[in-house]
Image (cartoon, grey):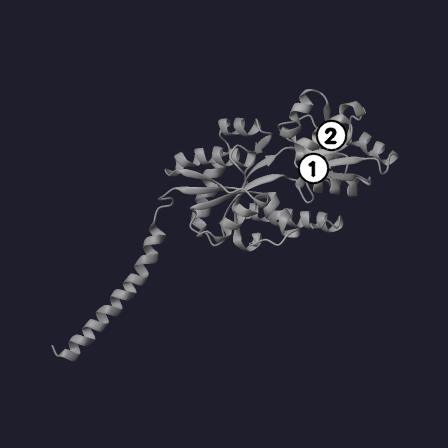
Amino acid sequence: MTLRARSRTFTASLITAVCVGAVSVPALHAQEKYPSRPIRFLIPFPPGGAADIIGRTIGEKISARLGQPVVMDNRAGAGGAVAAAILAKAEPDGYTILVGLAGPITISPWLVKLPYKPDRDLLPVTRVSETLDVMVVPTASGIGSVKEFIEWAKRNPGNVRDGSSGIGQFDHLAAELFQRLAGVQLTVVTYKGGGPALIDLVSGQLQVAFCTYIVAAPHLQSRKLRTLAVVTPERQPLLPGVPTVGETVPGYGLSNWNGIFAPARTPGPVVDRLFAEINRALTAPDLKEKQNALGIEPVGSASPKEFGQFVRSDTAKWGKIIHDANIKLD
């Protein structure tokens, strides 16, 4: 064989080797069994809170099924936006997952400039829970229903004070929607958290609050506060005998949800595996018991697509509430 022929043969072999390598690397990744290493759950709040419990109870269940550890990574800050921003920049490989909530996903985009765009950077996997929120009043007020409260509020315009944990927070927006649909006037007083607001509600300095059930529970058990309704569109299993606000105020209904998100462009088979295992975990009796103790009801989705549609609808709903109330953050 001549030198030129050998050169042509070598060149052809090199090209073939490069092409085979180019095909085999993606093929290797495509055939890699998921998961093959630990999965990180980003938790947007400190350890011990509701979001942390939700993440840990789900992580414990799916870890056994997936055959890999699920590690909690608590990244608190900016109402959950810090954790969401980390997810937005993570590799879309299914090994970094966010236990997200309505605030930084569907509410904050209308109020602040975020370092990520939820509809572009975050991929909905499944809804996992509904945090029970209620409308409460002082028992001493003698008010026993939403209808009675509305009638009383209309007789006392300008004298009805609502306690909120902050401008643009879920409880604040719940009150804003209520006064618009019920035709009453509320003066929203902001506090550094729901606990301090309820102390003033018990003492009579406030007349109403929309809050999480678990925060109000001690005052409800001592009969200092009374639950008038749940704020969700449907009645809740945790309080089956309590009506919804919407049964008296047509069109009212809000969801204080938690859900699982992956980085955008995460492969479909990975998303499907996470969806299947997480929804299986949500049916476990012990998981339900632990979450119910915190006023949280495990709730799954029909599919990742259905959850994505839910998130888009929820985003539009919050946008309208914020726009109609002309809410702005300084």
In depth, the one of 185 and 63 nearer the eye is 185
* Residue with the most extreme left position: 1
Q: List the residue tagged with mark 2.
A: 200
The crowding category of the residue bearing disc 2, from other C-alpha atoms within 10 Å (few below 14, some 14 to 19, many at least 20), is some
Residue at left offset 66%, top offset 41%: 170
Residue at left offset 78%, top offset 43%: 180
Image vertical order of residue 221 relative to residue 104, above or below: above
Residue at left offset 68%, top offset 41%: 166
Horizontal and vertical percent position of residue 16: 25, 67
Residues at discs 2 and 1 in contact (Cβ within 8 Å)? yes
Inspect this view and state whether residue 235 appears. Answer: no
The crowding category of the residue bearing disc 1, from other C-alpha atoms within 10 Å (few below 14, some 14 to 19, many at least 20), is some
In the image, taking residue 96 as reference, residue 2 lies left or right, namely: left
Image vertical order of residue 315 relative to residue 225, above or below: below
Rounded to the nearest angstrom, the CA distance separating label 2 from label 1 is 10 Å
Q: Quadrant of the N terminus?
A: bottom left
Horizontal and vertical percent position of residue 96: 45, 46
Horizontal and vertical percent position of residue 305: 54, 48
Residue at left offset 20%, top offset 76%: 8
In what element is the residue under mark 1? loop
Horizontal and vertical percent position of residue 262: 49, 48
Q: List the residue tagged with mark 1.
A: 191
